[in-house]
Amino acid sequence: MSKPVSRPAKRPRRPASSPVAAAATTTTTPSTRQPAGSAKAPRHFAIIGAGMAGIACARTLVQAGHQVTVFEKSSAAGGRTTTIDSPFGGFDAGVQYFTVRDARFARAIDTVPGVCKRWSANSVRVLDAAGRVTAAGLPTREAHWVASPGMQSLVATWAEPLAQAGRLITDTRVTRIEHDALNAPGWQLRTEGPDGGHHVYAGFDAVLLAQPATPAQALLSTSAIDSSLSAALSSVAIAPCWTLMLAYPQAVRPGLTTLGPQWNAARSTHHRIAWLARESSKPGRPSVERWTVQASPAWSAEHLEDDAERVQAKLIKAFAEVTGIRAQPAHAQTQRWRYAQTTHPLGRSHLWDAQLGLGACGDWCLGHRLEDAFVSGLELALAVA
């Protein structure tokens, strides 16, 4: 990446390579920005969000010869594929597995051989509220895949070239989208770092929102942007999810490899729990017995603002009721996802306002599967490239 050029400001200018101190504001204009022209002219896109949709969109635009800068509020790319580490091994706190139905997704996965592995838990059990198996398993028409050593590995691998080029900016929250002060009709982004420092990135020909629909709509509202995207985003509904992660290292001893049930994945009708998976059964994972438990959408919504410790205690109790595992876990942790599962999708693969140069993508466009996120990001990139 070429060295950014800082615009003069009232405050003393800091070197572009140094951290931005709290309360300091700088503006960065990429020196390689080219004016918008024909569809074939290289342009500079800002992408907000480094989950599957954002990274799929970014890598497609780069392959088409464009320049991208991806902004991510978390410390790394991944989104809901995030893998949370513990002393006993990782947990796939969000996306548990994925299926492959679109040939384009299959070809993309083939570009990173060895990263994705087939999970043996194709026969997902169905449980009643008391944990009894009510069906032998869901249909096994298609393979269940996971990334290794964690679900985050697939997005992280695709994002690595962007990171190496300095085009993935993490720990950075975009607070406002504005028309570029010096290069109309382009765009600039106001951002905030973890230390409270503020920065302005300028010189973008278009801005693409690869976020859940609700925060994407909120950002457009905060930015006072009048676009058809806002009304479309408001039609999407996404349910929250509380996730519980448990580790039982005491199960790893001679004559005992697992605790509780002998299945590795199940959907539950318990009023608190919708999904359970034995993390240690996934390929490429440590053998320490670990479980990821996802609460039902209704229960998660009801307890969305509850204290995490209270939620953890309730979910551990429900886990024991469903699995019969009443041993004390050596490790317990919760993760709250405000936007987890799409309940009312957009119904099309992406949004694009060509007049303003604003777009949006995400799994919520088509559904809630990981492949939906990939297809959404890909098709938005193809539409704007």
Image (cartoon, rainbow, N blue to C red):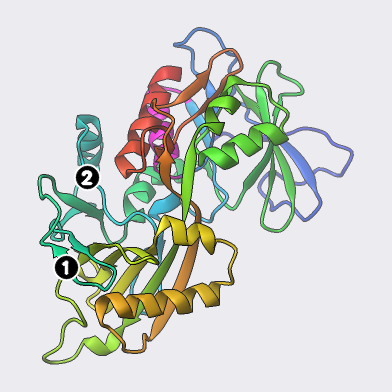
Q: Residues within 10 Å of mark 2 (few under 14, many from 20)?
A: some
Instruction: Give the alpha-carbon distance from disc 2 to disc 1, as whole Å.
Output: 24 Å
Q: Is residue 305 left or right of residue 288?
A: right
Q: Main secondary structure of the magenta part?
A: helix
* Quarter residue 4 falls in: top right
Q: Residue 149, image x and y in percent?
A: 28, 62
Helix, strand or loop under label 2: loop
Residue at point 38%, 86% (across, down): 330
Q: Is residue 354 left or right of residue 79?
A: right
Q: Residue 50, image x and y in percent?
A: 47, 44
Q: Residue 94, image x and y in percent?
A: 39, 57
Helix, strand or loop under label 1: strand
Q: In this rendering, which labeled residue sits more in front, label 2 or label 1?
A: 1
Question: Mark 1 highlights which residue?
Answer: 133
Q: Is residue 342 left or right of residue 133?
A: right
Q: Residues within 10 Å of mark 1 (few under 14, many from 20)?
A: some
Closer to us: 66 or 148 = 148
Residue at point 61%, 17% (across, down): 356
The reply to whether the magenta stretch includes residue 12 is no
Question: Mark 2 highlights which residue?
Answer: 99
Q: Disc number at residue 293?
A: none
Q: Residue 128, image x and y in percent?
A: 24, 66
Residue 201 visible in the current orientation: no
Label 2 vs 1, first from the N-terminus: 2
Q: Is residue 180 above or below residue 56?
A: above
Q: Amino acid at mark 1?
A: Val
Magenta-highlighted residues: 51-66
Residue at point 50%, 20% (across, down): 352
